[in-house]
């Protein structure tokens, strides 16, 4: 690595690569959503959409699998996500992390507003190839369950990952958030209430929104506007104790 590049990276900080990757995902995700919307409007995805939905029909013969699909899709429903978000908000209030609380509220409510606006503007019809195994009331593109699952679970997952102490736990939390989001999207196609491209667009839009919220939270945290996690508080306390100990040794 050349010296100028090395100096730039050292000046920006050790985590600059992570931020750059996040920004690239935001740009790439936005581009993918726009491309998907353009393909859908031109009807170029209709064949593959219909083929995938028809491929799930034989799997509906199993009652236990239909019940499992409804259980999984409920994890992306408005009631479950609202209840989960409220539980986190109450926890943040009880621990006096008020800025983090507002971040969760803005991220989740903003994601819901964005999903509703996109559905209203695009107004794609729901698939009618098979019976709907779940009740639906809105238009199809993007999948609201998929998008809101990505927004809520990834936002809360990144918040939790910022306070757990080890890298393994951070990977576990983010991985679990991604898994739940993925399963919710699959369940919408299996239940026959969304085209696969609806789900892909929902995942993409939700991921972009969640990363944007994470970038904002990261910047606010660096400025001290968002409270540090327990592990960071412990590190700060440990550093202070070490400094006190060194000063005591120097005074002897």
Image (cartoon, rainbow, N blue to C red):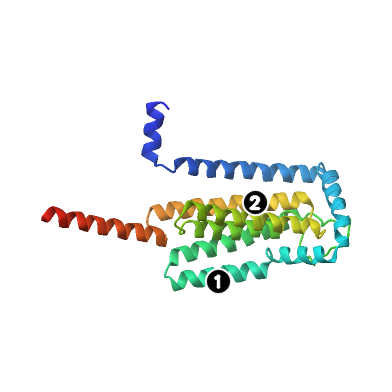
Query: Which of the two discs, 1 and 2, labels the residue nearer the N terminus?
Result: 1
Instruction: Please say whether residue 69 is visible from this viewpoint.
Output: yes
Residue wearing tag 1: 87
Q: Residue at x 54, y 62 (%)?
A: 106
Residue 24 appears in which quarter of the rendering?
top right
The quarter in which the N terminus is drawn is top left
Q: Is 140 on the left or on the right of 22, as rendered?
A: right
Q: Which residue is mark 2?
A: 205
Q: Is residue 63 above or below residue 176?
A: below
Which x, y percent locates residue 138?
A: 76, 63
**Residue at coordinates 37% horizontally, 37% vertically from top-left?**
10
- Residue plotted at (68% across, 46% down): 33
- Asked whether residue 228 is in view, the answer is no
Element class at badge 2:
helix
Q: From the viewer's perspective, is residue 28 above or below residue 91?
A: above
* Residue 74 quadrant: bottom right
Which quadrant: the C terminus? bottom left
Cα–Cα span, label 1 and label 2? 24 Å
Q: Quadrant of residue 44?
A: top right
**Residue 5, image x, y percentages:** 41, 30
């Amino acid at each position: 690595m050349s010296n100028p590049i090395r100096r730039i990276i050292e000046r920006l900080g050790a985590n600059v690569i992570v931020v750059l990757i996040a920004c690239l995902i935001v740009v790439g995700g936005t581009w993918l959503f726009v491309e998907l919307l353009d393909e859908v409007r031109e009807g170029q995805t209709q064949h593959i959409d219909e083929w995938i939905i028809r491929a799930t029909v034989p799997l509906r013969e199993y009652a236990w699998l239909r019940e499992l699909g409804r259980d999984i899709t409920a994890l992306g429903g408005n009631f479950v996500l609202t209840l989960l978000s409220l539980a986190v908000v109450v926890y943040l209030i009880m621990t006096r992390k008020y800025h983090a609380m507002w971040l969760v509220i803005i991220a989740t409510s903003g994601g819901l507003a964005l999903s509703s606006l996109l559905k209203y503007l695009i107004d794609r019809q729901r698939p009618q190839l098979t019976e709907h195994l779940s009740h639906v009331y809105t238009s199809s593109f993007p999948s609201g369950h998929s998008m809101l699952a990505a927004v809520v679970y990834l936002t809360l997952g990144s918040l939790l990952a910022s306070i757990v102490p080890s890298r393994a736990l951070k990977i576990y939390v983010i991985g679990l958030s991604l898994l739940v989001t993925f399963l919710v999207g699959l369940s919408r196609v299996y239940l026959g209430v969304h085209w696969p491209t609806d789900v892909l667009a929902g995942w993409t839009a939700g991921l972009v929104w969640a990363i944007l919220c994470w970038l904002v939270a990261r910047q606010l945290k660096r400025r001290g506007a968002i409270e540090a996690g327990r592990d960071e508080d412990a590190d700060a306390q440990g550093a202070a104790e070490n400094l006190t100990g060194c000063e005591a040794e120097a005074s002897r």
